[in-house]
Amino acid sequence: PVPVGVAGELYLGGTGLARGYLHHPELTAEKFIPHPFWHEPGARLYKTGDLACWRTDGNLEFLGRIDQQVKVRGFRIELGEIEAVLGQHPGVREVVVLAREDEPENKQLVAYLVGQAGQALVMREVRQYLQERLPGYMVPAAYVELEALPLTPNGKLDRRMLPAPDKAPPRSKDDFSGPRTPIEQVLVEIWAQVLEIEQVSIGDNFFELGGHSLLAIQALSCLYDTFQVELSLRVLFESPTVATLAERVKNTLEAGGARVPPIMPTAREALLPLSFAQQQLWLVEQLERDNIVYNIPFPLRLSGSLDLVALHASLDEIVRRHEILRTTFVVVNTQPIQSIAPSLTLPLLLVDLSQLSEPRREAEAQRLAREESRCPFDLERGPLLRTTLVQLDRTEHLLLLTVHHIVADGWSMNIFVNELTVFYQALITHRPSPLPELGIQYADFAVWQRKWLQGDLLATQIAYWKQQLAGALPILALPTDRPRPVVQTFRGARCGFALAESVSASLSALSRREGVTLFMPLLALFQTLLYRYTEQSDIVVGSPIANRRQRETEKLIGYFVNMLALRVRLEEGLTFRELLKRVRETTLNAYAHQDLPFERLVQVLRPERSLGYNPLFQTSFTFNNKLAIASQLPGLSLKPIEIDPETAMFDLRLEISETDHGLAGFIEYNTDLFDCATAAEMVAYYQTLLERVLVNPNQTLSALLALIEVERGRSSRCESPQSGPEVALVDAQDRLARRRASLSARQAQLPAEQRTIFQERLQGKLNDC
């Protein structure tokens, strides 16, 4: 079952279905599978191998054969479908689409086109024609115009004679516009560098070329290095082409521009303060010693021939290169400061499990990984990075990396892995390191931050957040399975999920049409989910941001990430498309005021504090763009593996990441509040919300939620065909009793001014039930 317009494999069932293939039991077992949606025992479905989708008129549209698919960047693609759409272009007479890998690990779609007689093809128009009709992952990256397709002597297409894209211009002359001014020339070079493409036209859209928010921040950092002009992410959204952005840069330069002082090295003889974010974590550690909630586990699976000496030396080189990994935190005159050791040899604990049987070996490795991730750090003694190497067999190892959040963040771990591969490769090939020395260190950033974030700049940031978070901040009244403890615990678990490649691609296409990044519709869906479970129209969700706006911080390991409080109001008559616009505005405004540390924001707002929940927001959303992590070395490959740290900073946290196979993620939940079944229900509801929004983003939230409730009710009845009205009534009464107890318990935990409103809503809800 898939939504209208989403491609899937066609299955056939019903009374007219054959029993199987005569005298071919293996093929019968493969193609005639048990029918999962039919109540009669023994019912079968036949796997046709055809790709199809439902049309809005109720008919099925044939899209091609699955066995003719190719896989590019993790997406399964039917080449015939692309050729069919291109063939409908009025200027195209013949077309062939191939998946080529002319460079290692760089497979891309290439379209070969023969135009109509007397007509010149404009490749930009052809590309735009496809973008309006196909998801982005099916739009070819390169286009080659030919006078005729090469044929074999018997008249068939000779695919071997089709030239590589670099042997023919990817654009027609009319399709490319080169830079006209020095500013446009610089922007073209920046985009080509950041997006890793060879040719950029001044009319190209940054986000259509594959840009996302993290790459946008890098591009803006490069722009600042050149022109000393700081532009917000909103500017790039509003001016996404080279030509329009160059005009904004020109106007900003003429107006004087907003300038940020560069980060300069600081003398190490002076006392080095903590950054604002570090100081907050340090305070938490003083209140609760042996706290493991800020541990960052990052295990790596190493497959192949491992040189242990080179690995250990590579780890030591990373520690030498980044002062923050040699830093501890001590108190001088009642104030915490950074104490940087001049050198540090990192201990590498070795554990050999190769003598165990395979099942016991894997189980023991998982136990060791969990145990290592839950071991606390001592901020005063250090080191704040631990490494353990677990040998599984001769060619398989687990490298268990655990670091304290006060010296690193998620971005830092990607830097760590990339540098590990660079140093390891240099050592085993007896070459010097190709990485230049760092110009600044994290301590320099901390000093710079405290000098820069004050005066008018600080006042402007505070004024925005005071306005955005004015009034009584809502406490999210999620229906918990157990009453909230008086003191918040951080025990947690995760419930994972993966979205189908076709769903991920459709969401990317929706994002491009609406002029948003993938982060925004995923956040809007999460807020809609919270709206459904709490019936609160005022939703505040926390979201981390990389906070590396200066280019010199992009290569540093350290704790830069900041939390943003994203507040959006929802109502029943609001359509999802309208909600998405609100989320876009809220997010871009928050990005423009991201420099105020979350800790300072809490101090300024002074929300009513409780030991039972986080201030400002109780849920969090994280989206991870796909980052390039070096993973292949001579004779050795590295692969990050997931581990559940069994902790939860918030009541709920949704994290979604881009992978080679589409989007995947998990809901992390506090196990003192929620059961696994509740988290699984939320995951299923979130996925259903996404699928329904892709079918029709113009639905109102009330209609969208009502449709899903009807579908879920119908599904529940199908799963329990023996359940009669009496059973349904008992179930409803039981759910009502549990709901009443949960809501009443949460009412007692609310601030006094919110209890009356909550009581009225509670009574109305119970009356409706």
Image (cartoon, helix red, strand yellow):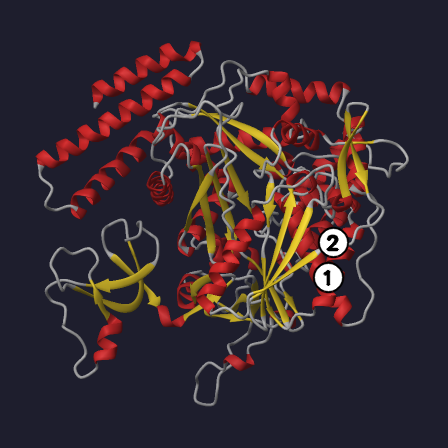
Q: Nearer the viewer, residue 237 or 385?
A: 385
Q: Is residue 1 above or below residue 50?
A: above
Label 2: element kind:
loop
Q: Are marks 1 and 2 in contact (CB under 8 Å)?
A: yes
Which kind of residue does numbered mark 1 sit on?
His
Q: Which mark is residue 745?
A: none
Q: Real-space Cα distance between discs 1 and 2? A: 8 Å
Q: Is residue 200 visible?
A: no
Label located before the other in sequence (1 or 2): 1
Place of residue 186 in the rendered image (x, y in percent of width and height, measured from the top left): 76, 48
Per the image, the residue denoted by label 2 is 346
Place of residue 753 in the rendered image (x, y in percent of width and height, measured from the top left): 43, 9
Answer few, some or many: residues within 10 Å of disc 1's Cα (few below 14, many 20 plus, some between 14 and 19): some
Q: Nearer the viewer, residue 352 or 444?
A: 352
Identify the image quadrant of residue 559.
top right
Q: Is residue 401 above or below residue 428?
A: above
Which kind of residue does numbered mark 2 sit on?
Leu
User: Does residue 316 appear to the left or right of 243 in the view shown?
Assistant: right
| Residue at (73, 61) in percent of width and height | 312
Q: Is residue 356 visible?
A: yes
| Residue at (42, 53) in percent of width and height | 133
Rendered-image quadrant of the C terminus? top left
Per the image, the residue denoted by label 1 is 312
Place of residue 651 in the rendered image (x, y in percent of width and height, measured from the top left): 45, 32
